[in-house]
């Protein structure tokens, strides 16, 4: 196995020493906190936008900083410095230390000893930060052409490419010290179709923790463009969506956003530790039909939601959330696992150095079942078949969640028929999976474009789903 | 502040030296304090100063942008050089360039953005505000059994903008938010809600106790919520939920949505697009307004722009770029994205208050729904198709009755705007986009 780097950029280029790490952690614990950690981040972002058949803009971003966290009991102190100047980092450490009760004795400080990671989930030929812009422009040009060639009713095409190369170094007072280099790329195509004064849009994107080569082999820009154009054209003949409860079949892949909203957030340990989640206290109980086994897995190579280590330095895991219908566990970060006295699961994540880590999802999906997807559709007399979704949201406390279909069809007498306009589906997290009556054998993970928001922090995530049938869920259309 | 100005000048000089024919740079420094409390104890305390540089360069009609949190000379010089090189690789765009130099002003009114009173509050008092807000919610009723917490956020932000046309401007503002989010419980489940006060001025901050009580009331009235049968009824939105409707109008009149023809309000200028009750403006010059600013993020002086005047669409909102694309004038809505590029953002974008009290509006409804929260993203800005999850209270014979949840409301924004039958007199700002209570004549409620 090859490790990501034999040495971190923070040691090599920014001249951080283990002595520095010890000094900063020691300052952070100077008022007697139980635990402290440092999160160094150096992130390079690029984007290129192709629109109206020209290269509209190119951007580059550089972010550098270190976040210092001090935990004292259930309290967290946090501060950061937007440069690595020794005095500024020490000042941030003192500010974070303010949280601790000066009367307590203070946690012990383990000397951070850097270790190389054993595995690399994203071993790539060249980091996105080092790519030539010409390669990106070629992909966008191909996408634009393919979308316009698809149908003369496609009037607007916007193709964009974004990448990120994030170097992190995480050191903690319990002696942990790890680093990682985390690549991320994404290509999006958006089309507007126009006919007789009516306009419709279509969207498709893909990506992962890869380099640009993902779009030069596995995923073609042309394929994404054709898919975006197809959706826009299809919507021109979509009829109003139905309103009311009905049988719904979800297609494989991205509709896994159902799991993310309905159960994923509700199983994040912070909400359960505080008792504010509708799932609090339900471990060991039946929350889904026996057909449902749901996992969160941050260890799948090259996936958008995967990480070698989470943003607290712990290796990611495959965590079983629901096993054959029974709720088995929560997604933990360090703070919640300590307070709940359960093992960490490698789900402590943060947007960047200026944010406090929280328990978050990685790649969340349902294991494949045994049904043939065609049989699932054939089993429905009157219902909805939803294959593409926009975003979703959940109210953790009441458990009610929504996710919005952007491509859906009526099912009539076991056949997929007319496309319907976008509609929001609404359900109850702790009970919706009891309604799952068939699970397909066609598990797919999504294309790698998911963004999850929580407490103002956005992070990349993945979802996945086989084709499933939900006996009843409320569809929010306009046709009564 | 002078050090930020000198950084801006350094960036502009460097860009010019490296071959940029025009450039503008925005530098923002933010001094932030945030505390969250839960069950009367401090949970998190965060304090820091952050800085960011947002640069845009032009090489002829080609452009590139960049951003950096690292303002050291070496980092800036390297990034400026790279940005100029990147610009050379993009395409010529006839509409590109800085705003017309004749637009840049030198004198700006005092918009009352800064309140130095906040600086006299030591951390202990700031923490105490959050503790008091949350405690008031916890003590309000014995069914308030838990809490997502309370919090106080404060920031003091300095903004400096400089460009190659010789414009250098700066302004400074404060902003704070105090909130509480209690959890109520009854035999059939938990409900949470929140209330907050957001302001630039200490004297305008609602009392911690009032915030806590209002939050508790909002959570308590949701207890026992149930579904209703699918129906078509009048829907009343409280100001907290109605502001999202006004936000959808903002997206639809943003110049970039218009030139991309991805808005349901394309080709509608001077046409009736809403009920005559509807007047919407974007006013950047409201004294002390949360979205007020003297000039926008590309240096254009801000203004008050009529958007919808008694139902008639009057203007789209523009940056210099979208204005050139559509043969119009910039409206002072330039806003820097995190990448450094200029996009279109709202100033104080709001639906003007009407004549009715919220009670009068509710009492006008025989059977209908009063919305207190909307969730999800089921809004298609291109077509106006609208379908979102909702939480509210059922209205029967003009009175609020039982709480409702796990339902959606659906329609199309084109028709919804025409059905704005009554507008409340209770315009409330929780952010730059704001609304009073609104009644929409009919929408489809999907439930059981």
Image (spheres, coloured by chain):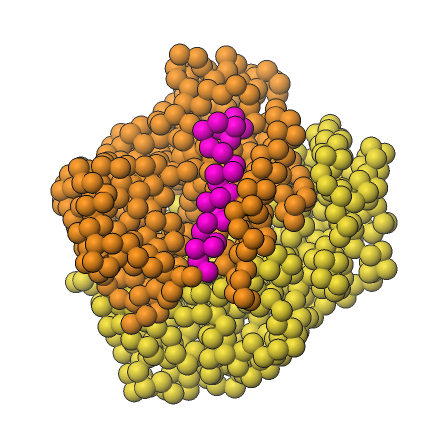
The residue lying toward the viewer, choosing from A459 and A250, is A250
Tint of chain B: yellow
- x and y percent of residue B431 in the render? 54, 62
Residue B225, image quadrant: bottom left
| Residue beneath the point at 26% across and 57% down | A411
Q: Is B108 situated left or right of A125 in this image?
A: right
Please give the letter of the chain rendered in orange.
A
Q: Please state the horizontal and vertical placement of residue B356, each as a whole percent of the image.
A: 48, 85
Expressed as whole percent of the image width and height from the top left, the position of residue B219 reads 32, 65
Quadrant housing residue B296: bottom right
Q: In this view, does A154 lie to the left or right of A172?
A: right
Overall secondary structure of the magenta section = helix
Near-viewer residue (A223 or A307) = A223
Q: Quadrant of the C terminus of chain A?
A: bottom left
Residue depicted at 37% across the width and 66% down the height: A240
Q: Give the range drawn in magenta.
A: A210-236
In the rendering, at what x and y percent does residue B61 appear? Answer: 79, 45
In the image, is residue B433 above or below residue A356? below
Q: Is residue A285 above or below residue A246?
A: above
* B366 and B30: which is toward the camera: B366
Q: Is residue B277 left or right of residue A381?
A: right
* Residue occupying image coordinates x 26% and y 37%: A442
For the N terminus of chain A, the quadrant is top left
Q: Can residue B415 be seen in this view?
A: yes
Is A223 covered by the magenta stretch?
yes
**Picture residue at 46% right of the left edge, 80% below the top:** B419
Asked if one can make out residue A359 in the rendered structure from this viewpoint, the answer is: no
| Residue A280 magenta | no
> Can you say whether A258 is above or below A312 in the image?
below
């Amino acid at each position: 196995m090859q490790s990501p780097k034999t040495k971190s950029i923070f040691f090599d280029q920014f001249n951080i020493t283990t002595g520095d790490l010890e000094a900063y952690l020691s300052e952070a614990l100077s008022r007697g906190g139980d635990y402290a950690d440092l999160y160094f981040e150096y992130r390079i972002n690029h984007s290129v936008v192709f629109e109206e058949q020209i290269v509209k803009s190119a951007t580059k971003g550089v972010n550098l900083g270190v976040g210092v966290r001090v935990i004292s009991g259930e309290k967290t102190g946090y501060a950061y410095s937007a440069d690595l100047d020794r005095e500024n980092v020490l000042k941030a450490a003192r500010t974070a230390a303010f949280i601790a009760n000066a009367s307590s004795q203070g946690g012990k400080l383990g000397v951070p000893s850097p270790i190389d990671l054993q595995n690399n989930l994203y071993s790539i030929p060249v980091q996105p930060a080092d790519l030539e812009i010409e390669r990106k422009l070629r992909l966008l040009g191909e996408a634009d052409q393919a979308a316009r060639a698809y149908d003369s009713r496609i009037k607007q095409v916007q193709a964009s490419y974004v990448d990120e190369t994030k170097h992190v170094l995480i050191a903690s007072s319990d002696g942990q010290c790890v680093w990682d280099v985390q690549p991320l790329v994404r290509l999006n195509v958006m089309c507007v179709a126009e006919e007789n004064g009516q306009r419709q849009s279509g969207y498709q994107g893909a990506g992962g923790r890869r380099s640009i080569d993902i779009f030069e082999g596995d995923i073609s820009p042309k394929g994404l463009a054709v898919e975006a154009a197809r959706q826009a054209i299809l919507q021109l003949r979509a009829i109003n969506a139905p309103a009311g409860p009905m049988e719904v079949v979800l297609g494989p892949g991205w509709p896994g956003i159902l799991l993310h909203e309905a159960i994923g957030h509700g199983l994040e340990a912070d909400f359960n530790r505080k008792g504010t989640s509708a799932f609090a206290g339900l471990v060991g109980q039946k929350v889904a039909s026996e057909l449902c086994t749901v996992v969160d897995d941050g260890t799948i190579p090259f996936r958008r939601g995967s990480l070698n280590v989470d943003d607290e330095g712990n290796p990611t895991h495959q965590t079983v959330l629901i096993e054959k219908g029974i709720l088995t566990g929560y997604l933990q970060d360090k703070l919640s696992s300590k307070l709940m006295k359960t093992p960490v699961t490698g789900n402590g994540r943060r947007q960047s150095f200026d944010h406090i880590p929280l328990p978050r999802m990685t790649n969340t999906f349902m294991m494949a079942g045994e049904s043939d997807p065609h049989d699932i559709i054939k089993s429905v007399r009157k219902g909805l078949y939803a294959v593409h979704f926009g975003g979703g949201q959940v109210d953790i406390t009441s458990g009610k969640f929504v996710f919005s279909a952007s491509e859906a069809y009526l099912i009539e007498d076991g056949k997929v028929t007319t496309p319907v306009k976008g509609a929001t589906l609404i359900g109850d997290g702790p009970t919706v999976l009891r309604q799952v009556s068939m699970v397909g054998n066609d598990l797919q993970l999504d294309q790698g474009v998911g963004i999850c928001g929580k407490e103002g922090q956005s992070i990349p995530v993945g979802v996945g789903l086989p084709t499933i049938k939900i006996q009843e869920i409320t569809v929010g259309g306009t046709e009564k | 502040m002078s050090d930020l100005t000198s950084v801006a000048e350094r960036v502009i000089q460097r860009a010019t030296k490296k071959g940029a024919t025009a450039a503008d740079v925005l530098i923002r420094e933010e001094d932030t304090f945030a505390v969250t409390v839960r069950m009367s104890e401090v949970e998190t305390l965060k304090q820091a100063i952050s800085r960011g540089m947002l640069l845009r360069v032009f090489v002829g009609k080609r452009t590139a942008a960049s951003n950096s949190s690292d303002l050291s000379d070496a980092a800036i010089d390297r990034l400026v050089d790279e940005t100029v090189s990147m610009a050379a690789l993009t395409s010529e765009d006839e509409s590109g360039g800085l705003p017309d130099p004749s637009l840049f002003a030198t004198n700006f009114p005092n918009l009352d953005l800064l309140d130095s009173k906040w600086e006299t509050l030591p951390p202990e008092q700031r923490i105490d505000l959050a503790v008091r807000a949350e405690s008031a919610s916890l003590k309000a009723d014995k069914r308030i059994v838990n809490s997502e917490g309370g919090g106080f956020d404060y920031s003091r932000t300095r903004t400096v903008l400089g460009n190659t046309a010789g414009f250098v401007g700066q302004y400074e503002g404060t902003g704070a938010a105090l909130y509480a989010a209690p959890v109520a419980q009854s035999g059939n489940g938990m409900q949470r809600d929140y209330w907050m006060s957001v302001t630039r001025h200490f004297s305008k901050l609602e009392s911690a106790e009032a915030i806590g009580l209002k939050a508790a009331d909002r959570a308590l009235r949701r207890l026992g919520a149930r579904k209703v049968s699918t129906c078509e009824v009048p829907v009343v939105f409280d100001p907290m939920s109605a502001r999202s409707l006004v936000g959808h109008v903002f997206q639809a009149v943003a110049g970039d949505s218009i030139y991309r023809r991805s808005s349901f309000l394309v080709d509608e200028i001077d046409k009736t697009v809403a009920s005559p009750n509807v007047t919407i403006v974007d006013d950047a010059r409201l004294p002390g307004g949360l979205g007020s600013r003297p000039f926008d993020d590309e240096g254009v002086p801000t203004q008050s722009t009529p958007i919808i005047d008694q139902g008639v669409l009057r203007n789209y909102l523009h940056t210099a770029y979208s204005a050139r694309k559509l043969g119009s004038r910039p409206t002072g809505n330039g806003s820097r994205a995190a990448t450094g590029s200029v996009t279109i953002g709202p100033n104080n974008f709001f639906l003007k208050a009407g004549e009715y009290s919220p009670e009068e509006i509710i009492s006008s409804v025989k059977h209908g729904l009063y919305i207190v929260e909307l969730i999800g993203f089921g809004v298609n800005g291109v077509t106006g198709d609208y379908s979102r999850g909702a939480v509210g209270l059922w209205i029967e014979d003009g009175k609020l009755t039982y709480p409702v949840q796990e339902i959606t409301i659906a329609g199309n924004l084109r028709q919804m705007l025409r059905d704005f039958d009554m507008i409340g007199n209770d315009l409330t700002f929780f952010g730059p986009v704001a609304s009073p209570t609104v009644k929409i004549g009919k929408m489809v409620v999907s439930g059981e």
